[in-house]
Amino acid sequence: MNKLMQALLFGAMVGVISGCGGSSSGNSGNTNNWNLVGGSNIPGSNTVLNSIVYGNGQVYTGGSVDVNNPAVFNYVKSWQITGGNYLPNPNGATEQVNSIAIDNNKTLYAAVNVTMSGSFGYRPTVGYLANNSGNGGSWVILANESGVPDNGGINSISVSNGTTYAGTGGYDLNNNVYYGHVYSCAGAQSPWQAVGGESVPNGGQVYSVALSNTSSVYAGTGGYDLTTNSSFGSVYVSINNGSWQQVGGGAIPDSGVVTSLAISPTNQIYAATSNGNVYLSTGNSSWSLFGGGSLPNNSSITSINLSSNGLIYAASNNGNIYAAAINQPWQLVGGGGMPDGWYANAITTASGVIYAATQGGNVYSTKISQ
């Protein structure tokens, strides 16, 4: 039996057990093994969850409550709002936590996007960064500016040794082009610095940022070319803050936007796309299709995670989560889609459990093999 089938069989056998004290989801007439973490919903109404991490023995998830309140929640016997309150809202506008990360010192980082009012229905988004040392700590806005230098939104963050890397993006209405940068911030009141000294090449927003164990910075990018009515995407790397270099010898083969990245301990690069594919590059080799083909039902991938069991898990906008090993087909995880009927915006794995944060404001889990 291959690694993928072993993992999925294990998940099916123990799926009725909550990954974090939750109760069984679904009904006796189906095989859905996803469990609502904590057995209860996230506090608040109209909640949307965009990100999820596991650290310090806890699950953290970030998003928005009642549209304009950016919030991070953590689970300790019950769901609590991290820091005791919503994040700062210095702009008094619609805000949401778009990405979160946790470092080895148990400090939590949150990227908050602010949708500003504008003319002709155009609503630009700007992002700022905050951190929290311990669940009871107060949120502190980092960097000495209220937003990133390019005035874009922050799509993704990663953190290493106290330095946060933020992938940004926006749309230049005057020139009809997308733009994106990766900025680094070394701590409170430290200025933003452009990684690679410039924006990522060839236009496009930075939708995903990932760090290798050699501290190289990877950026998953993409955008839409209005002149050709087609999407595009690439992965770039900056080594020792050097100029950006394209990974895999060229653009992503399916021309999709790179929505999520994962890096193995041996620095294999996995890139997920809006066209439902995952590509693999080893040693900067050309991109090869992972998982034997696209995800089922022509779905777009919202998030991927490389688990300690060696499998890639991929969340899709059809509500399902799939797993695959190299040269093996994608298999459904948990026996079905998210019980709340929404799709997962973000997933993470830890200690034999996969956690999924949904557009509907819930966190679900199911067992996987370690």
Image (cartoon, rainbow, N blue to C red):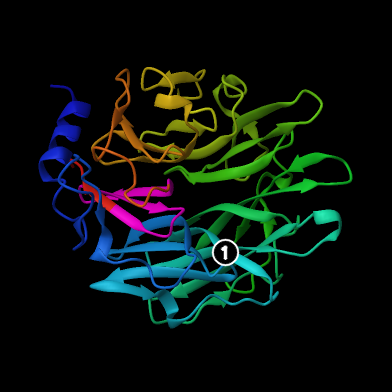
Q: Amino acid at mark 1?
A: Gln
Q: Is residue 367 left or right of residue 86?
A: left
Could you say whether the residue bearing mark 1 is in a helix, strand or loop?
A: strand
User: Where is the N terminus found, in terms of image quarters?
Assistant: top left
Q: Which residue is mark 1?
A: 96
Going 67% across and 28% down the picture, which residue do you hit? 231
Q: Is residue 253 left or right of residue 26?
A: right
> Is 241 in front, or is 180?
180
**Residue 277 visible, this orientation:** no
In magenta stretch: residue 325 = no
Dot 1 alpha-carbon crowd within 10 angstroms: few under 14, some 14 to 19, many 20 or more: many
Q: Is residue 159 left or right of residue 11?
A: right
Q: Is residue 2 above or below residue 203?
A: above
- The spot of residue 23 in percent (x, y) is 19, 59
> Is 86 in front, or is 189?
86
> Is 128 in front, or is 92?
92
**Residue 214 visible, this orientation:** yes
Q: Is residue 21 above or below residue 44?
A: above
User: Where is the C terminus found, in terms of image quarters?
Assistant: top left
- The spot of residue 144 in percent (x, y) is 69, 72
Magenta region, mostly helix, strand or loop? strand
Going 26% across and 41% down the picture, which residue do you hit? 308
In the image, the segment drawn in magenta is: 343-364
In magenta stretch: residue 348 = yes
Query: To which quarter of the image does residue 247 belong?
Result: top right
Q: Is residue 306 above or below residue 116?
A: above
Going 24% across and 40% down the picture, which residue do you hit? 334
- The spot of residue 332 in percent (x, y) is 29, 32
- The spot of residue 362 in percent (x, y) is 37, 59
